[in-house]
Image (spheres, rainbow, N blue to C red):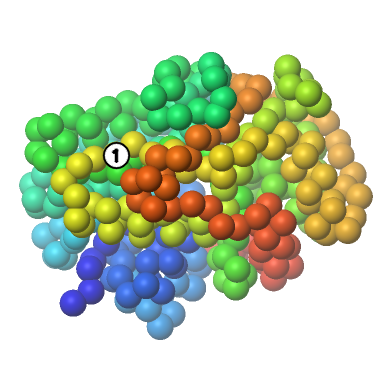
């Protein structure tokens, strides 16, 4: 009998790739998404010839959550639903605390009632704030500089509390910068506007829309921020590894997911230009708030605990994005 996995936010960029990977590996997937930031078409693509059930609803509605758990024998929850734009969170902190913290608590409450004991949570490297040492490991201080980062850190703390109260085991993944699209070009990133550098650079190189730097000048060798880039398909694979870990262990884990390497904004632009064989026209836009100079991950714990390591290169990520945007230059229809 297939394991049934509830994925919140699977109409979005990361969640849809996680769902696609699990469906291909013989899981049943139940998707909960309110479509405020996700896309119905992504769900329709994934539903073709697959064991996916879609519930249009909100994690802020406990009744919707309770009904899902009553109607399905769920083995684990993968919680991807969130608001995730640091600069937007500066202007709209209440919305971020409401969705990212209260929504997570609602899920945990419903899990406790239904006696579902495993959750994988999409957190973020934004909880670390400015790096005090590099690469960053999971014991690094947490000092987020945006309401987004704070909301995710508070959600992590809520999950740890429910472990103590209700023995809900967890794997919390702290994602670094996500890039790429599915290798077959079926699904990808449709955020408009996107805050993801590689996506925007590829769109600029394809002439879909102008590319602009949105980073401030920082204290790095080339003056642009350094980040860690992980391909979304590698990220999806990590979730299956985490499910396998939780199925056989009664211990919870906090794990970085990245490539373990730092690349500056200008280095990523150079990689896009080299892979695509073009010279990208670059404009300068107003710098985004809540940025920091350098952060990249120590990923040794991921290898040790869940036996995962990234496989896809920056070049392959760029190629997958070119394939995606050539097919859907404006993303999903709806």
Residue pictured at 28% horizontal, 33% vertical: 102
Residue pictured at 82% horizontal, 45% vertical: 270
Q: Residue furthest bottom?
A: 49
| Image quadrant occupied by the N terminus | bottom left
Q: Quadrant of residue 218?
A: top right
Residue 75 in the image: above or below residue 174: below
Residue pictured at 23% horizontal, 66% vertical: 4
> Does any portion of residue 99 appear in the rendered image?
no
Residue 153 in the image: above or below residue 145: below
Residue 250 in the image: above or below residue 52: above
Q: Nearer the viewer, residue 302 or 273?
A: 302
Residue at disc 1, secondary structure: strand
**Could you say where residue 98 lies in the image, as x and y percent from the top left?**
34, 31
Residue pictured at 36% horizontal, 60% vertical: 240
Q: Nearer the viewer, residue 260 or 48?
A: 260
Mark 1, residue position: 253
- 300 relative to 108 in the view: left or right: right
Q: Nearer the viewer, residue 305 or 81?
A: 305
How many marks do you count on the picture?
Answer: 1
**Could you say where residue 106 lies in the image, as x and y percent from the top left?**
22, 40
Structural crowding at the residue carrying mark 1, measured as other residues with C-alpha within 10 Å and reported as few (<14), some (14–19) or many (≥20): many
**Could you say where residue 24 lies in the image, as x and y percent from the top left?**
41, 74
> Does any portion of residue 167 appear in the rendered image?
yes
- 300 relative to 33 in the view: left or right: right
| Image quadrant occupied by the C terminus | bottom right
Q: Nearer the viewer, residue 30 or 77?
A: 77
Residue 152 in the image: above or below residue 24: above
**Could you say where residue 178 lies in the image, as x and y percent from the top left?**
57, 46
């Amino acid at each position: 009998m297939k394991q049934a996995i509830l994925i919140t936010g699977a109409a979005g960029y990361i969640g849809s790739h996680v769902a696609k990977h699990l469906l291909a590996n013989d899981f049943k997937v139940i998707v909960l998404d309110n479509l405020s930031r996700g896309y119905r078409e992504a769900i329709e693509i994934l539903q073709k010839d697959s064991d996916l059930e879609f519930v249009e609803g909100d994690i802020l509605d406990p009744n919707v959550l309770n009904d899902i758990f009553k109607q399905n024998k769920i083995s684990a929850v993968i919680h991807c639903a969130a608001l995730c734009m640091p600069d937007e969170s500066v202007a709209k902190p209440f919305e971020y605390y409401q969705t990212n913290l209260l929504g997570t608590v609602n899920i945990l409450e419903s899990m406790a009632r239904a006696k579902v004991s495993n959750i994988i949570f999409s957190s973020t490297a934004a909880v670390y704030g400015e790096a005090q040492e590099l690469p960053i490991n999971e014991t690094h201080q947490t000092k987020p500089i945006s309401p987004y980062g704070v909301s995710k850190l508070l959600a992590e703390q809520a999950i740890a509390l429910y472990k103590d109260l209700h023995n809900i085991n967890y794997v919390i993944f702290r994602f670094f910068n996500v890039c790429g699209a599915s290798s077959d070009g079926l699904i990808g990133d449709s955020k408009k506007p996107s805050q993801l550098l590689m996506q925007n650079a590829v769109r600029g190189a394809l002439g879909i829309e102008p590319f602009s730097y949105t980073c401030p000048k920082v204290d790095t060798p080339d003056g642009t921020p350094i980040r860690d880039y992980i391909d979304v398909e590698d990220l999806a694979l990590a979730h299956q590894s985490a499910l396998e870990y939780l199925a056989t262990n009664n211990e919870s884990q906090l794990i970085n997911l990245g490539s373990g390497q730092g690349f500056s904004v200008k280095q990523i632009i150079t990689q896009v230009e080299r892979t695509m064989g073009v010279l990208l026209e670059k404009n300068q836009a107003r710098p985004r708030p809540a940025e920091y100079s350098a952060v990249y991950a120590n990923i040794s714990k991921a290898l040790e605990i869940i036996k995962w390591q990234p496989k896809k290169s920056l070049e392959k990520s760029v190629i997958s994005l070119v394939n995606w945007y050539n097919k859907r230059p404006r993303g999903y229809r709806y």
